[in-house]
Amino acid sequence: MQPGTSEEVRRILLLVAVAGLFGLSIGYLFETLFLALSAHLIWTIYQVTRLRDWIVGRMQEQAPDTDGMYGEIVDALTRAQRRDTRRQQQLRYRIKRFAMMTEALDEGLLVLDSDLLLSWWNPAAAALMGLRKEDRGAAIINLVREPAFVSFVNARSFTEPLEMPSPHRREQTLQFTGARFGEGETVLVVSDISRLRALEGLRREFVGNVSHELRTPLTVLRGYVETLEDTEPPPGMQGAYGQMAAQIDRMQALADDLVLLARLESMDYERDSTDIDLGELLAEICREADQISKGLHVITLEVEPGTFIKGSQKELYSGLSNLVFNAIRHNPEGASIEVSAASKRQEIQVAVSDDGVGIDRRFLPRLTERFFRVDSSRGRSTGGTGLGLAIVKHVLNQHNATLTIDSRLGRGSTFVCHFLRSDEPMPEQVNA
Ligand code: ADP
């Protein structure tokens, strides 16, 4: 029993004993006991009422001056109140720090509830997206109606960031990433990547322009070297003209690929889109591949009749030829190369597979990076620029298509281009 409770019991027993003795002495035992216990009950009600008034007043007033069991209740409540006040202060401090932190961020933060209603945002989000106080509680897809944004938010998978012009200032490019938390809520992070995109544009333009400018002097040099090749080289210069010509050819190929990549990446470039007969296109590529191979590889072509895709003939030729020429350049003579095109479910698949050297699986995700070569010393000797698969990736991007690569070291490689048959939505992932 708690000390306060036992004191209360002792007090009642004492009251009963004293009242009992007094009642016995005056000959009114039960009446005296009744009066004493009634007085105790009234005192108890008085204590409880004081306690209730104090609690109802949120314990702001002076605590009632009481002892025993009621004193203990007052003490326990006062302690709990102090604890609560301390916690509230800590919580307020943390909320203040969090608010200061989110206000200091350049990135915008938005919190959406499980129904995608806007419940909170920081000042950066307000500035980037033009949000006003009245927007609290509004459906985000009514505030930003861009179809890409609506599907990004509705899908709630947030595997890839979304890039789009700001709904507030069209010249600004925003990037959104998202995550789900709590009970179906969503947090969106929005950042202004206009500067980054502008710099990328400058970089692209610069590389494209420099490469383009290099073409003319290289052509002139090539012409002179060709003339020199027909003459007798000075002593000690045997083979030099041939090497010069080969290096100029390499530089020309590099400049051509860089110009092509810059064009493929450019948003402003107007693309032609015609119906392309894959049978004809792949046959032309295989004829050129035969010449490069000089008959040292076995090239077979199998195309389902009437396989057409929409796109740019020139770009598709560059992209698909890179896959076939790679199969020749990176594999030893005697290797078999199969080129095929067929409809599969919603897709048209163009596959180039070989039974050659193969590629270590750990390099597969990096193959489409610019200048990535599995074996850099061998790569250069094969005459490639290191840009082939980057070009393939960009050409496919422009055609709403994806590339998958499968390869086993020593067994060969298969590169498959997945084109959509109609205006189906894009498959989610490129597992290169
Ligand atoms: P490169 O100009 O070197 O061919 P790519 O971007 O076209 O550049 O290819 C990148 C690298 O991928 C190559 O250097 C080569 O190591 C590897 N590769 C590409 N295709 C094949 C293939 N069919 N067989 C083996 N390796 C390949």
Image (tube, rainbow, N blue to C red):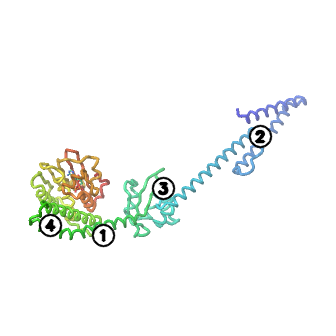
In depth, the one of 237 and 386 nearer the eye is 237
Dot 1 falls on a residue whose secondary structure is loop
Q: Earlier in the sequence, mark 3 or mark 1?
A: 3
Looking at the image, do the residues carrying marks 3 and 1 touch, with CB atoms under 8 Å apart? no
Mark 1 lies on residue: 268
Provide the residue designation for mark 3.
113
Query: Along the polypeptide, which appears first: circle 4 or circle 3?
Result: 3
The amino acid sitting under disc 3 is Asp
Helix, strand or loop at mark 4:
helix
Q: Disc 2 marks which residue?
A: 67
* Amino acid type shown at disc 1: Asp
- Image height check: is 163 above or below 335? below
Label 2: how many Cα within 10 Å (few below 14, some 14–19, many 20+): some
N-terminal-most mark, 4 or 1: 4
Asked if marks 2 and 1 touch (Cβ < 8 Å), the reply is no
Q: Residue at x 21, y 68 (%)?
A: 215
307 or 367: nearer the viewer: 367
Compared across the picture, whether 64 is left or right of 155 comes to right
Relative height, residue 48 to residue 393 (above, below): above
Q: Which residue is mark 4?
A: 225
Looking at the image, is mark 3 or mark 1 nearer the viewer? 1
Do residues under tags 2 and 3 come within 8 Å of each other at their CB atoms? no
> From the viewer's perspective, is the residue at label 2 or at label 3 nearer?
2
Q: Residues within 10 Å of mark 4 (few under 14, many from 20)?
A: some
